[in-house]
Image: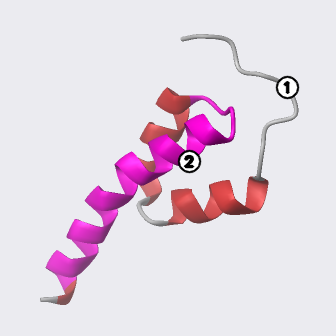
Amino acid sequence: MGFWLFVIISIGSIPLAGAMAQERNRSLRTWLWIAVAVGPLAPLALLILGDAKRPVSAD
């Protein structure tokens, strides 16, 4: 049960990290891949980092 809960939370963190990255003017694609790699730690990292200092160019 615990493993599946971790998997569901990890998959759910991917769109959350993407939305947070767009809000904070960070690269969407990069943060989606970071969320795939580290799971729920990606949104936490975005909370700590905050807004980007310079705007990101369009992908």
Q: Residue at x 45, y 66 (%)?
A: 40
Sooner in the amino-acid sequence: mark 2 or mark 1: 2
Q: Are marks 2 and 1 in contact (CB under 8 Å)?
A: no
Find residue 54 and name its label.
1
Find residue 3 and name its label.
none
- Expressed as whole percent of the image width and height from the top left, the position of residue 12 reads 30, 59
Left or right, 2 with reference to 20: left
Callout 1, which amino acid?
Arg
Residue 14 in view of the camera = yes
Q: Residue furthest front?
A: 23
> Image quadrant of residue 51?
top right
Q: Residue furthest top?
A: 58
Q: Secondary structure at mark 1?
A: loop
Range of the magenta residues?
Answer: 3-27
Residue occupied by mark 2: 20
- Expressed as whole percent of the image width and height from the top left, the position of residue 21 reads 58, 41
Residue 34 in view of the camera = no
Q: Residue at x 53, y 40 (%)?
A: 31
